[in-house]
Amino acid sequence: MKTSIKSGLAVAFTFLMFAALQPAQAQTLAKNGQWLEKQFDQLIKDKKDNEAPKFTFKGCQMNMDLDTKDKEVSVGMHMGWLLSDVRKISYKKEKNGQYTLLLDVPADKVKMAMNVGGFGGSFNQDSKDKHNKDNTTSLNLSTTDESLVRQIKQKLEESVQFCQQSKVN
């Protein structure tokens, strides 16, 4: 009888600790998202046209929006994926000393929508493209500060891990 009471108390304690940690992890996810939005908005720009995509993190959803106008035609693009679908995050140093962040996301998990001069549509990759080896989304970061890039990678990995654990529970 004493063993079952101890077991019951252990289960109750574990449940309470998990319930207490969930809001803290969700708060960390929100803080990471805000911090990553700020960093991406500062560091990711098209060097030629000085155009920049807008990044948003809504819970476990990562979005990238880009609106541009070329002469008479406006183009809008939206890409989004769940952080729980990110398989790997890495970075590499380019010849110019700046860094590229690499996100490995299965092609069939990336949702896209485009609007070209009033015509639009949304799509994602075919299921046959799932096994394509090149599922990498590259984000060119305008920085030579490797410690900042490591920090970006760490916060993304932390958010991905939380979202993957939340998906399992």
Image (cartoon, rainbow, N blue to C red):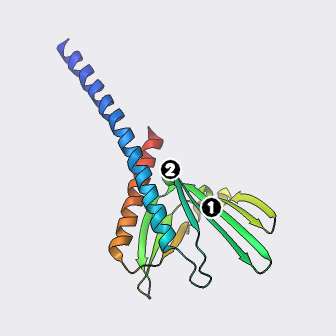
Mark 1 neighbour density, 10 Å: few (under 14) some (14–19) many (20 or more): some
- The answer to whether 125 appears left or right of 120 in the picture is left
Q: Residue at x 73, y 58 (%)?
A: 122
Q: Is residue 110 left or right of residue 146?
A: right
Q: What's the residue at 58%, 73% (across, down)?
A: 52
Residue tagged 2? 60
Q: Which residue is mark 1?
A: 79
Residue 125 image position (x, y, % from top left): 67, 60
Q: Quadrant of the N terminus?
A: top left
Name above or below for residue 108 compared with residue 143: above
Q: Residue furthest left?
A: 2
Estimate the x, y position of residue 140 in percent, counting from the top left: 50, 76
* Secondary-structure class at tag 1: strand
Secondary structure at numbered mark 2: loop
Viewed as shown, does residue 162 lie left or right of 140? left
Q: Is residue 39 above or below residue 145?
A: above
Mark closer to the chain start, 1 or 2? 2
Q: Residue furthest bottom?
A: 96
Q: Position of residue 67 (x, y in %)?
A: 67, 69
The kind of residue tagged 2 is: Cys
Q: Position of residue 2 (x, y in %)?
A: 17, 14
Asked if the residue under mark 2 is in contact with the one under mark 1, i.e. CB atoms within 8 Å, the reply is: no
Where residue 108 sits, quadrant-wise, is bottom right
Q: Quadrant of the C terminus?
A: top left
Q: Say which residue appears at 27% left-offset and 27% top-offset.
A: 13
User: Which quadrant of the view contains residue 151?
Assistant: bottom left
What amino acid type is highlighted by mark number 1?
Answer: Met
Residue drawn at x 60%, y 85% is 48
Q: Residues within 10 Å of mark 2 (few under 14, many from 20)?
A: many
Disc 1/disc 2 C-alpha distance (Å): 14 Å
